[in-house]
Image: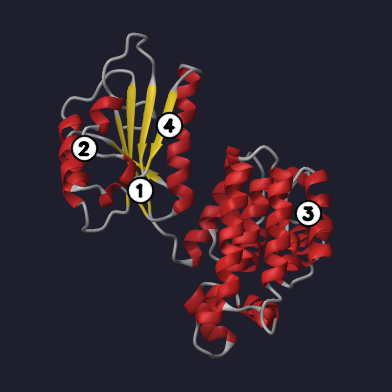
Amino acid sequence: MARKTANDDPLAPVTVAVGQEDLLLDRAVQEVVAAAKAADADTDVRDLTPDQLQPGTLAELTSPSLFAERKVVVVRNAQDLSADTIKDVKAYLSAPAEEITLVLLHAGGAKGKGLLDAARKVGAREIACPKMTKPADRLAFVRQEFRAKGRSATPEACQALVDAIGSDLRELASAVSQLVADVEGTIDEAVVGRYYTGRAEASSFTVADRAVEGRAAEALEALRWSLSTGVAPVMITSALAQGVRAIGKLSSARGGRPADLARELGMPPWKIDRVRQQMRGWTPDGVAVALRAVAEADAGVKGGGDDPEYALEKAVVIIARAARSRGR
């Protein structure tokens, strides 16, 4: 869970999100953008990578406007900014513009620490987004996800979900959302068991499983059913990404017992066995092709394309084909 400083105003002139947990970093950005749009629906949001923020760009983006529009400027991987751009940002921090919120995402290491120190010195709002490497942290995250959605889940259900999904926070969050949307009343261990040992028709993970196993027709059928039952497209791309990444991780790992590999890769032992079965037709090139397909689908469902369903179908077909690339 992201931890915040005492200054908890999302519209503070400067917010710094520090850490390497992508989901928490994205949520920090979403919180600021949502607050800005609540204050002004026409808020202009600029989301920039280091190569897009050249010397002088920040001054241009934050210069006074005739229309006094509210603006959110997001800078990702701020630790990778060039030295000249860091000077620009430090200068801006000393005199931030009105109606503009600057959001800096910083990995938190030694690289670019001077920029982070400068932001802290001027009292920037800070959100800690550390990687959750401990099972106890992921368990606490799941509990908080249920609480945030106003739902009750037993301790056993939360633990079962962590055991089933593993270390990917996006997948854990997606699983909580799916359970909350589909199940009434208290969510218990039996409910979690039913979802992750069955319920193929409603599970984004089933779409991913069939795709990485090379079973294109079944994957497409599961995809269409999932979409028709209200599963969010972003949940499906997240499941596809997890499935392909698991193949890539295990194929590059040294051999060993499932328990040893589970500790090394952050997966439950049962999943190691399943991924081993799924990866039989895969090659390194196939993994690369599949990851590109997932990235394109993810962009498509997040507004980069006109038809999210088509973007997902295309990705599923490419992944299923890649799963059978060995021996062709």
Q: Residue at x 43, y 31 (%)?
A: 32
Q: Is residue 217 above or below residue 100?
A: below
Q: Give how far across and how far down residue 228 sits, in percent.
A: 82, 44
In this view, the residue farthest toward the front is 328
Q: Residue at x 27, y 32 (%)?
A: 57
Q: Quadrant of the C terminus?
A: bottom right
Give the label on residue 55, or none. Answer: 2
Give the label on residue 223, or none. Answer: 3
> Residue beneath label 4, please?
32
* C-alpha separation, residue under disc 1 versus residue under disc 4: 15 Å
Amino acid on which the number 4 mark rests in the picture: Val
Of marks 2 and 4, which one's residue comes earlier in the chain? 4
Amino acid on which the number 2 mark rests in the picture: Pro
Amino acid on which the number 1 mark rests in the picture: Ala
Camera-side residue: 18 or 233? 233
> Residue beneath label 1, please?
128
Q: Give how far across and how far down residue 147 sits, in percent.
A: 59, 44
On screen, residue 193 versus residue 137, left or right, reads right
Q: Secondary structure at mark 4?
A: helix
* C-alpha separation, residue under disc 1 versus residue under disc 3: 35 Å
| Numbered marks: total | 4
Q: Secondary structure at mark 2?
A: loop
On screen, residue 127 versus residue 281, left or right, reads left
Q: Is residue 240 above or below residue 258?
A: above
